[in-house]
Amino acid sequence: MSLGSRWGHLGVDSGRDWFTAPAPLARIAAFRTFIYLYIVLDLLVLTPDVASRGAESGALYQPVYIADFLHLPTPSKPMVTFIFWALLVLAPVAASGKMPRLLGSTVFLLYLQWMFIAMSYGKVDHGRAAFLTALAVLPFVGRARHGDMRLSEIAGWALRTTQIVVVLTYFLAAWSKIMASGLVAWANSAIFTQAVLRRGTIFSEWTLLAPGILVLSQWATIVFELCSPVVFFVKQRLRYFIVGGFYLFHVIVFAGTTIGFFLHLAAMAAFLPLEKVRPVRAAYWCIGKARGCSGDDVAQAMRRKRERLPFVPRQPRTEPEQMREPV
Amino acid sequence: MKPALLSPARRVACIAASVAVVAAFAGGTISHDDNWFPFAPFRMFSTATNPDGQVNVYRVEGVNAEGERLTLDPDVIGMRWAEIEGQKEQMAADPLLARNVADAYDQRNPSRPQIVAVELIFAYYDLENGSATGECEEDVVASWYHEDYPTPQPSDGSLSDLSCSGGVFG
């Protein structure tokens, strides 16, 4: 069987093309806006504790290997504050799509340094790999405008690489479990009992009285993780279902233990047709409609804006002279 | 519409980069060492807890200069309990490291009485066939006590629902 027929249903001609299967530039534009704005959410809401680093003495600082190898300085308060504000300002600008290579690279390096700080105090969080990968590959795509449906191989490669790391996060998590404990031993263990005892919620604490359910969940988890690469070998429609399943898995984990892999969830959007979500266009549409414009008017105004034509305000409709009431 | 294609050289570079990324994460997983971040292994919950063994649940408590015991929650000390737990061996060997937790509290809460004792407390729940039996014991695995203040009474667990007495089966 030739590669062509084997990969044909995936819309690519060969395994080589699979890595660079073209994707619309609009998808990159949407993904880029989403990911860079997500950094703001992460800084302010998801992991705000990183911003308090540097205040305490450096004695608890244990740099991870790469930070150590690069001789990155021990975090001080001014340094942490600088990176925080630099990211808080630059990430939204990068989200606009301006100077995608320069700003994208800068934001990636700043955020990587931010992560090195966050992970160098005795606890390394898992599930950040795909988000960092997305930040690393996005600058390579260069310019991509919202709504630009032209296909591009480099855009496809950036999304594919992010998708690969999303799936690796699951697959290698299963591998880690097998390495650390053995497949059967892990799946039959009481590790979820430990998780619920430590971080249980009203949705999960009842399972402590029914440990069989937790063991069943462990088997389901490791089978799901081992099978996750299947998402690449199915048709598009089924792929969306599987990605929906990934999201559902995290909803259940969060409900049961309040553990959320939020950055991973954001990166997983690389699987989705994000170009179809157009919040700004929808807002224009709603405002236009509210002002009584027809759908055609709004569409025309937006086209003029996109093509950077000068804005020509519509003449207000005046009643004929003879119709006016006498003053 | 014809897609924007990569030159053959760039295509090879892109594929090589993707393969290198996969190799780096696989290598990190084999190393089984978190310090390889961002290529650290995905070790979340990778250990197998013995269904007939014990489960540990930890918390961090402190005592202030007025003798009042309090839970040193992550938001009042600016560090996560998992980070303190991750350095428990070093803190057990060198109590002055645990003092950093007190310093962090004092810096963030200058108007409150200073912290003169820090304790990382483990509650060990006994399991039988994966169910907690209700048997539970506690141990202070790392601590720091200010030399100018009397050693405080041991925690009675009343401050935390993660303790043996306040726990799920308490």
Image: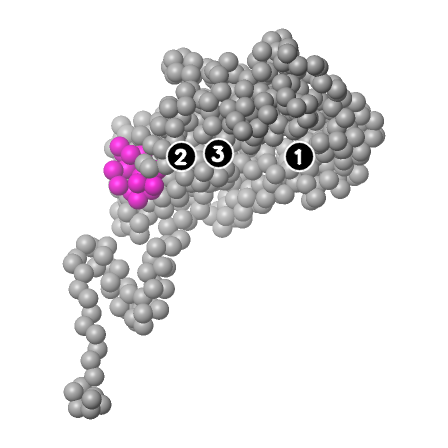
Residue B163 location, x and y as percent?
Answer: 74, 29
Residue located beneath label 1 in the image: A199
Tell me which chain the residue with mark 2 is part of.
Answer: A
Query: Mark 2 Cα within 10 Å, few/some/many (few <14, many 20+)?
Result: many
- Amino acid type, mark 3: Pro
If you read the primary sequence from the N terminus, does the residue marked by circle 2 or circle 1 appear first? 2
Indicate the quadrant where residue B99 lies: top right
Q: Which colour scheme is used?
A: one colour
Distance (Cα) linking label 1 and label 3 = 20 Å
Q: Is residue A100 magenta?
A: yes
Establish whether labels 2 and 1 are both on one chain. Answer: yes
Q: Is residue A163 magenta?
A: no
Residue A10 location, x and y as percent?
Answer: 43, 43
Residue A161 location, x and y as percent?
Answer: 41, 33
Discs 2/1, front = 1
Can residue A175 be seen?
A: no
Q: Which residue does the image show at 68% across and 26% down from the upper left?
A: B68
**Residue range corresponding to the magenta coloring:** A91-104
- Amino acid type, mark 2: Ala
Q: Do the residues labelled 2 and 1 touch (CB within 8 Å)?
A: no
Label placed on residue A167: none
Label placed on residue A48: 3
Q: Which residue does the image show at 55% across and 42% down from the upper left?
A: A246
If you read the primary sequence from the N terminus, does the residue marked by circle 2 or circle 3 appear first? 3
Can residue A81 be seen?
A: yes
Residue located beneath label 2 in the image: A134
Residue A71 location, x and y as percent?
Answer: 38, 13
For label 2, the SS is: helix
Establish whether labels 1 and 3 are both on one chain. Answer: yes
Discs 1/3, front = 3
For label 3, the SS is: helix
